[in-house]
C-alpha cells in the first residue's frame, strides 16, 4: 500500500509534465504521419552522413569516365561502336572481374557495329543496361545480343520528393518478369568468384542473403519516409564516405580513369585486373548527374554525382556487406520510434520544469539537443537511422510549453500570494498557506506571533526547520492527506513555539487552486490547550466516579450474594430457594411441564457433629453440597435451608419416575464414604418428593408435602425416598 501511495503521489506531481509531453508528442506524431516532416528528416540524415568519419577508398571498382576530353578526342556523341568495341577489348586484356557498360546501346552507331557485336560475344563478364518502365514510350531497350545472353541489368534509380537518391533497387518485376539491377548484376559477378551466390534470408525467406549480409526490403514508412513508393525490391543505401582529396582517388570514393587514357594505353593494368570496371559518362555536357546525401554540403555549393558513380556506390555497398559484413542502413519499428519521440517530449518537459533560471534552462535545452543529435549520430555510425527531427521538435515543444506554463504560474502565484496576504491578515486566528513543496508562502501576523518567529524567517521554510521531528511528521502527514484527497481535514495536534511551550491546537486544512492551477494548502489554527486541559480534568473526574461506582457495584453484588446464598456451602439459601421455586412454577405453568421438589435431610449428621465437632460437621456439609451439585443438571437448583436440610428443584421433568431416579442417584452419592481428618464417615439421607402439578400448584403446599414425605422416609428406616 505504501508503494502504491508513493506511485500515486509521483504521478500526481508529474501530471502536468505528462499531459504537456503527451499533447506535444501526439501533435508531432500526427504531423509526421501526414508527411510534413519527411523532407526535414531526409535533410537531417544527409547532414549526419556528411559528419561521419572517412572510410578507406573502394579499391575493387574503377570508373572509366567519358569526360569532356574523351568526347573531344572522339569528336561525336553517341560514341561510335568502334570505340566502344576497342575500349572493351583493351579492358578485357587486363582481366577485370566484371565490366559494366552504363551507356544505352540499343541501336547501332556506325562505324564498328560488327566489332561491337564481336566484343559482346567474347566478353562473358560484360553487363549492359536498360531503362525499365511499364510505359514503352519511356523505357529504353537493352543491347539485343546482351539481352539474349542475359547480360543486362536495369539502371533505374529511385528519387525522393526532394530529388535526391537515398535508395537502391535490386529487383523489379515488369509484366510478371523479374529483372536484376545493373549494380546487383555486377556485384553478383564479382561475388561469384568468391563462392558467394544469392540465397534466402533466414529471418525472412522473401529477403535476399549474400554472404554475411541480409538485404531487408524497404517499406513505405521506413525511418523518416511516410507512404513512400516501395515498388520493386528496394533498400536504404548506407553510402560510404571517402575523402575526395585523396590523391589516388578522383571524384568521391572510386578510382577514375578517362576513356581517352584507356584507349591510349595510359592506364596501369593493376587498376583494371580483378576489379569491377564501370564505363559511363561524367561529362558535364551530357547531364548524367544525380543528387545523393553527400551532394548537400554543410558549407559550400551543392555537388551532384555522376550516374556512373552512383551505380558504383550501389555496387560497393552490396559487395562490402556480403564480404566484410559492412552494416546496411536499418530503422526502428514504428512503436519504438513513437516511444523514442514521446520519451524526448517528456525529457523536455521535465528539464524545463526542474530548472527555474532562464539562462541555465536555455543552456540545458541546448545541451540536451546536442545529446539527442549526438545519439542519432552515434546510431548512424552503427547504421541505424533514428528519428531526430520529430524528437527535437517534441523536446523543444515540451520545453517551451513548460517554460510558458511555469512563467504563467509564477505570475499567478505572485498575485495569489498578495491577495491571500491581504485577506488572512484581517483574521485573528493563526493562518498559514503552503505550496505543494510544503513550504510556507503566506503567513498572517497572528501565526507569526503564535510561533514566535518573524515572517521573513519563516517564508519558504518548512515545518522540519522549526518543530520537533515528531510534530513535523504529523504536520507533513496531515498536509499530504489534504493534497491527495483534495478534501478539507481537521486534526488535533501538538505545537511547540519558539519558547519551548507546547500547545494543543485544532488545525483545519483545505486545498485551494488559482487560475493557473497552482495549489495552496490553507491552514486555520485554534489554540485549544485550555479546553483540552479542562477536558482532561473532567475525564479524570469521570474516571474516578466510574471507579467508585464499580466498587459500589461490587459491594452491592457481594451483599446480594450474601443475601441469597448460604455462607458455609455457597449454595442458594432459603430466600433464593423460595424465589426460584416460584419462578419455576410459573414457567412450568406456561409450558405445561412437570416440576419435581426434593426435600433432603441427612441421617446421622447430629452424631458426626457431636462426636467429631462442629468444624468436622461443617466440612461434611460442604462435601455433601458439592456432591449434590455435581450429580444434578445445570438447570436444577440445589439449596440449603439450614442445618442438614437441603432442597432440589428439578425443572422440566418429562414424567414422575424421573424424580425417583434422581432421588436414587442422590442417595447413592451421599452414602459414599467421606474421610474427615483420618475419620471415615458414612451417612445417608431421607428424601421426600412432591411433584407439580400432580400434588399441588402452590409452592408452600409443595414444600410442606415434600417435608412430610421426607419424615415418612425417616420413619420407614432412613436412606430412602417417599413421594407425597
Image (cartoon, rainbow, N blue to C red):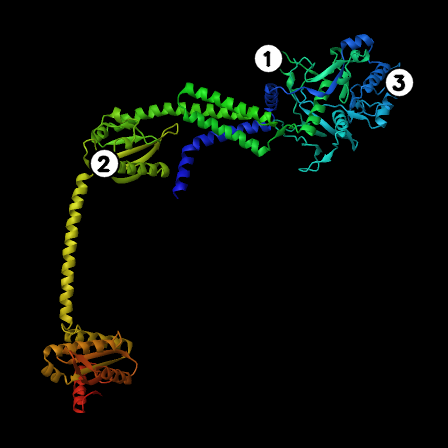
The quarter of the displayed image where residue 131 is located? top right
- Which of label 1 and label 2 is nearer to you? 1
The quarter of the displayed image where residue 80 is located? top right
In primary-sequence order, the first of circles 1 and 2 is: 1
Question: Residue 123, image x and y in percent?
Answer: 84, 23
Question: Residue 376, image x and y in percent?
Answer: 56, 25
Instruction: Kindly report the distance in space between the C-alpha atoms of the residues bearing marks 3 and 1.
Output: 48 Å
Picture quarter with the C terminus: bottom left
- Which element is circle 3 on? helix
Q: On the image, numbered disc 1 is attached to which residue?
A: 299
Q: Are marks 1 and 2 in contact (CB under 8 Å)?
A: no
User: Which residue shows up at 45% across the image and 22% down it?
Assistant: 364
Numbered badge on residue 325: none
Q: Is residue 364 left or right of residue 180?
A: left
- Which of label 3 and label 1 is nearer to you? 3
- Which element is circle 1 on? loop
Q: On the image, numbered disc 3 is attached to which residue?
A: 115
* Pick the front one: 338 or 419: 338
In primary-sequence order, the first of circles 3 and 2 is: 3
User: Which residue shows up at 50% across the image and 28% down it?
Assistant: 345
User: Which residue shows up at 39% across the image and 44% down it?
Assistant: 1
- Which element is circle 2 on? strand
Q: Is residue 712 visible?
A: yes
Q: Is residue 367 left or right of residue 605?
A: right
Q: On the image, numbered disc 2 is attached to which residue?
A: 495
Amino acid at each position: 500500500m505504501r508503494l502504491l501511495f508513493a506511485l500515486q503521489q509521483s504521478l500526481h506531481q508529474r501530471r502536468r509534465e505528462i499531459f504537456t509531453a503527451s499533447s506535444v508528442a501526439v501533435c508531432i506524431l500526427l504531423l509526421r504521419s501526414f508527411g510534413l516532416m519527411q523532407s526535414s528528416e531526409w535533410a537531417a540524415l544527409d547532414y549526419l552522413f556528411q559528419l561521419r568519419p572517412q572510410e578507406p577508398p573502394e579499391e575493387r571498382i574503377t570508373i572509366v569516365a567519358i569526360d569532356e576530353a574523351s568526347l573531344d578526342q572522339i569528336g561525336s556523341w553517341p560514341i561510335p561502336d568502334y570505340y566502344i568495341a576497342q575500349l572493351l577489348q583493351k579492358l578485357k586484356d587486363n582481366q577485370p572481374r566484371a565490366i559494366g557498360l552504363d551507356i544505352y546501346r540499343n541501336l547501332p552507331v556506325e562505324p564498328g557495329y560488327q566489332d561491337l557485336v564481336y566484343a559482346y560475344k567474347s566478353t562473358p563478364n560484360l553487363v549492359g543496361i536498360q531503362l525499365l518502365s511499364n510505359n514503352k514510350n519511356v523505357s529504353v531497350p537493352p543491347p539485343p545480343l546482351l539481352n539474349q545472353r542475359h547480360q543486362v541489368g536495369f539502371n533505374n534509380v529511385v528519387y525522393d520528393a526532394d530529388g535526391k537518391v537515398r535508395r537502391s533497387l535490386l529487383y523489379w518485376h515488369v509484366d510478371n518478369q523479374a529483372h536484376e539491377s545493373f549494380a546487383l548484376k555486377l556485384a553478383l559477378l564479382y561475388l561469384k568468384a568468391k563462392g558467394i551466390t544469392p540465397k534466402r534470408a533466414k529471418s525472412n525467406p522473401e529477403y535476399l542473403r549474400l554472404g554475411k549480409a541480409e538485404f531487408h526490403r524497404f517499406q513505405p514508412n521506413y525511418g523518416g519516409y511516410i507512404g513512400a513508393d516501395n515498388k520493386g525490391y528496394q533498400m536504404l543505401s548506407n553510402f560510404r564516405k571517402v575523402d575526395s582529396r585523396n590523391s589516388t582517388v578522383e571524384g568521391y570514393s572510386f578510382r577514375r580513369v578517362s576513356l581517352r587514357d584507356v584507349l591510349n594505353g595510359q592506364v596501369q593494368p593493376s587498376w583494371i585486373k580483378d576489379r569491377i570496371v564501370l564505363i559511363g559518362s561524367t561529362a558535364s555536357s551530357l547531364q548524367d548527374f544525380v543528387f545523393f546525401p553527400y551532394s548537400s554540403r554543410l558549407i559550400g555549393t551543392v555537388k551532384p554525382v555522376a550516374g556512373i558513380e552512383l551505380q558504383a556506390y550501389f555496387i560497393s555497398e552490396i559487395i562490402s556487406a556480403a564480404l566484410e559484413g559492412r552494416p546496411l542502413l536499418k530503422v526502428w519499428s514504428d512503436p519504438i520510434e513513437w516511444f523514442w519521440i514521446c520519451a524526448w517530449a517528456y525529457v523536455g518537459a521535465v528539464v524545463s520544469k526542474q530548472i527555474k533560471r532562464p539562462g541555465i534552462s536555455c543552456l540545458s535545452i541546448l545541451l540536451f539537443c546536442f545529446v539527442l543529435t549526438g545519439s542519432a549520430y552515434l546510431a548512424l555510425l552503427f547504421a541505424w537511422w533514428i528519428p531526430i527531427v520529430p524528437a527535437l521538435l517534441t523536446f523543444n515543444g515540451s520545453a517551451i510549453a513548460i517554460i510558458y506554463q511555469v512563467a504563467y504560474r509564477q505570475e499567478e502565484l505572485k498575485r495569489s500570494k498578495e491577495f491571500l496576504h491581504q485577506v488572512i491578515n484581517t483574521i485573528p486566528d493563526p493562518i498559514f498557506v503552503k505550496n505543494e513543496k510544503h513550504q510556507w508562502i503566506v503567513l498572517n501576523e497572528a501565526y507569526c506571533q503564535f510561533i514566535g518567529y518573524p515572517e521573513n524567517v519563516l517564508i519558504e521554510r518548512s515545518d522540519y526547520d522549526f518543530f520537533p521531528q515528531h510534530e513535523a511528521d504529523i504536520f507533513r502527514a496531515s498536509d499530504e492527506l489534504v493534497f491527495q484527497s483534495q478534501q478539507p481535514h481537521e486534526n488535533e495536534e501538538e505545537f511547540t513555539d519558539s519558547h519551548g511551550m507546547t500547545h494543543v491546537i485544532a488545525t483545519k486544512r483545505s486545498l485551494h487552486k488559482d487560475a493557473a492551477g497552482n495549489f495552496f494548502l490553507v491552514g486555520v489554527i485554534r489554540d485549544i490547550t485550555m479546553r483540552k486541559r479542562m477536558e482532561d480534568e473532567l475525564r479524570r473526574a469521570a474516571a474516578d466516579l466510574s471507579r467508585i461506582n464499580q466498587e459500589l457495584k461490587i459491594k452491592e453484588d457481594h451483599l446480594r450474594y450474601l443475601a441469597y446464598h448460604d455462607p458455609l456451602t455457597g449454595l442458594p439459601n432459603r430466600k433464593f430457594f423460595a424465589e426460584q421455586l416460584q419462578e419455576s412454577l410459573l414457567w412450568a405453568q406456561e409450558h405445561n411441564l412437570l416440576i419435581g421438589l426434593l426435600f433432603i435431610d441427612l441421617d446421622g449428621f447430629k452424631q458426626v457433629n457431636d462426636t467429631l465437632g462442629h468444624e468436622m460437621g461443617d466440612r461434611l456439609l460442604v462435601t455433601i453440597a458439592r456432591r449434590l451439585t455435581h450429580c444434578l443438571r445445570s438447570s436444577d437448583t440445589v439449596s440449603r435451608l439450614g442445618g442438614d436440610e437441603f432442597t432440589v428443584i428439578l425443572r422440566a421433568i418429562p414424567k414422575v419416575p424421573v424424580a425417583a431416579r434422581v432421588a436414587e442417584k442422590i442417595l447413592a452419592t451421599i452414602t459414599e464414604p467421606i474421610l474427615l481428618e483420618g475419620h471415615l464417615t458414612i451417612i445417608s439421607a431421607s428424601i421426600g418428593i412432591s411433584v407439580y402439578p400432580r400434588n399441588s400448584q402452590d409452592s408452600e403446599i409443595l414444600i410442606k408435602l415434600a417435608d412430610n414425605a421426607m419424615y415418612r422416609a425417616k420413619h420407614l428406616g432412613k436412606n430412602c425416598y417417599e413421594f407425597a
